[in-house]
Amino acid sequence: MTRIVSHIVLPLTLLTATLAIALPAQASLTRTFVSAAGSDANPCTITQPCATFAHAYSLTAASGIIAALDPGKYGPLTITGAITINGNGWAAITAPAAGNGITINAGGSDNVALIGLEIDGAGAGYNGIVLNAAGSLTVTNCTLQNFVQNGSDGNTGNGIEMQPTTGTLAFTITNTTASNNGNVGIFFFPPSGSPTVTGVIDHVVADASQDGIVVFSTTGGSVVVTVSDSIASNNSQGGIFAGQGTATFKLSIDNVTISGNGTGIEARTPANVLLGRSVITGNATGVNNTTSPNTFYTYQDNRINLNGTDISGTALNTTFTSQ
Amino acid sequence: MSQQSAMTRTVPRIVLPLTLLTTTLALVLPAQASLTRTFVSSAGSDANPCTITQPCATFAHAYSVTAASGIIAALDPGKYGSLTITGAITINGNGWAAITAPAAGNGITITAGGSDNVALIGLEIDGAGAGYNGVVLNSAGSLAVTNCTLQNFAYDGTHPTTGNGILMQPTTGTLAFTITNTTASNNGDVGILFLPPSGSPNANGVIDHVVADANQGGISVQPSFATGGSIVVTISDSIASNNSAAGIFVGSGPATLKVSIDNVSLSGNFEGIGAANPANVLLGRSVITGNTIGVKNNTSPSTFGSYGDNRINLNGTDVANNAMNTLTPQ
């Protein structure tokens, strides 16, 4: 219990000034902090937090964490490596007009996790999250809303847009809301190449956008996406839209509520769709199946009624049974 | 009687100025684990008594002054350091407390008594690509983990005791564990791993509303090295996806092993579910798709039962090796 505490008293301002001059910016901190009362002249520690995610990111080590100490707006950010941004449910990013909230250009094995963020376009920003490249993306407890589409440009107006062109991406989007976006709430939209993706969308609300959840493919690669325990409703076009391209393409929709859309689910070749335990009602068209050969499978326990047209196109494929 | 005499001797009735008295006490009295509820804050100091008005800075120091079965709560967001638990305790991070495990170390290590209850609530425990495990349980009576995130733990390439979100490795007694509303992702080995190294531990476990994704393995119940024991685990309303090995693996060893998997989604893994003797598996209402192998049933004779209401399609191979037994709901 004997403690020796040496007391060296320096003028605090002098000490701080000396350190600030002597030390270059180093991305060496495992965990950094931002606060509404912070300053980017600070070292982003808990006692001297920074003001913006972007500056904190520049000081955070690979695979480190940036955490928000209090409610506030912490600015847009470009991510180029493995990182966790933990907004603790109260951190906000307002995307600049015609810009994006978070842009991800990371390495093929970098894990990016975004937790507890409200990312808002305020009716002027283009996208909430744009992923160009990463090994994995986790989005949980986030809200993405009010992004605008620039004319008919599909790369604008999205809550989350994922557009890898190569490699393998695992994405997991849970407990997240994407609403009031001019284009798509959650959009997998590779522009070219042959990316391989495995995705999980669970406990998501994708509503009041042009489309709720859209999964496209490109000229190759493989797409496996599961949508579960979610809501895709009140979108002016599709609640869930799957198709396009030539990839190996598998989409599971389980226990999802889809209502008040132009079309509840629209599927085109090459999508293989597994639909079970879902409620599809009050849409102009419930399901529009144009896959050919018919790869839209139902487990025959969905409630598809009271739509303008319940099933349009080809009747659902009943080849698969539960086991 | 002798204790009372001792106390009487050591408490002289001397009136001192209060500041001097406080200083004297601080120097003289050892830390005592006498507080039922203690607090940490990012503005706290471990020179404080860990009260709500004078919170401490680290979980480890607060733990040293918290009574058995007491509670440590985080007053605000911050990082509160790694911790070793040796008795009954609740750590309530309130969703904003974080622990960064040291490189090649663990976030929380639990070596508690056989009847001690340990509860971990609302913590983000991160390996930052360098720490080995989020939570390591060596012994306890019960473990509750809820509203926690465990991610980015590094596998050393050799030892399955590294790279795990939660590693439970009791060797004796009976452990009850309950892991709910928790995410374990991006870990080099397993998200949630039950792997006793020896002995015959019993365990009753619940895993519910858990996301175990983008690990090597999602959830593994593996009494491979145990010499006996009885293990019952239920996994429900959860996701085990995008893992490079198995979403869920159960089996091996001589223990009695019963695992229920209900309303679980497994996709994008190498294997959705892998099962080997002695696992008895009950599978129902689950979606298994987009895996290289959907179900790999190596139990023989087959003790892998299905209620016939699972959706196992569009995997490279839907059911490999042995067929599942058909069970009837009643």
Image (tube, grey):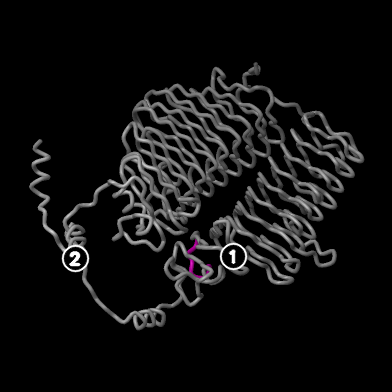
In this picture, residue B64 sits left or right of residue A249:
left
Mark 2, chain letter? A
Question: How many neighbours does mark 1 have within 10 angstroms: few (below 14), some (14-19), or many (20 or more)?
Answer: some
Can you give x and y, in whole percent of width and height, for residue A153 in the image? 81, 64
Residue plotted at (8% across, 41% down) = B5
Instruction: Indicate the chain on which mark 1 is placed.
Output: A
Asked which secondary structure carries label 2, the reply is loop
Q: Nearer the viewer, mark 2 or mark 1?
A: 2
Residue A125 lies, in percent from the top left, at 73, 68
The numbered dot on residue A259 is none
> What is the x, y in percent for residue A142?
63, 55
**In this picture, is A277 found above or below B300?**
below
Q: Secondary structure at mark 1?
A: strand
Residue depicted at 67% across the width and 32% down the height: B317
Residue B310 sits above or below residue A267 on the image: above
As drawn, the label of residue A4 is 2
Residue B209, compared with residue B23, is above or below; it is: above
In the picture of the structure, the residue carrying the numbered disc 1 is: A79
Q: Which residues are magenta?
A: A57-62
Which amino acid, by three-letter code, is at mark 1?
Ile
Residue located at (59% from left, 36% from top): B271
> Can residue A155 be seen in this snapshot?
yes
* Front residue of this view, candidates B197 and B89: B89
Residue contact between numbered discs 2 and 1, judged by CB atoms under 8 Å: no
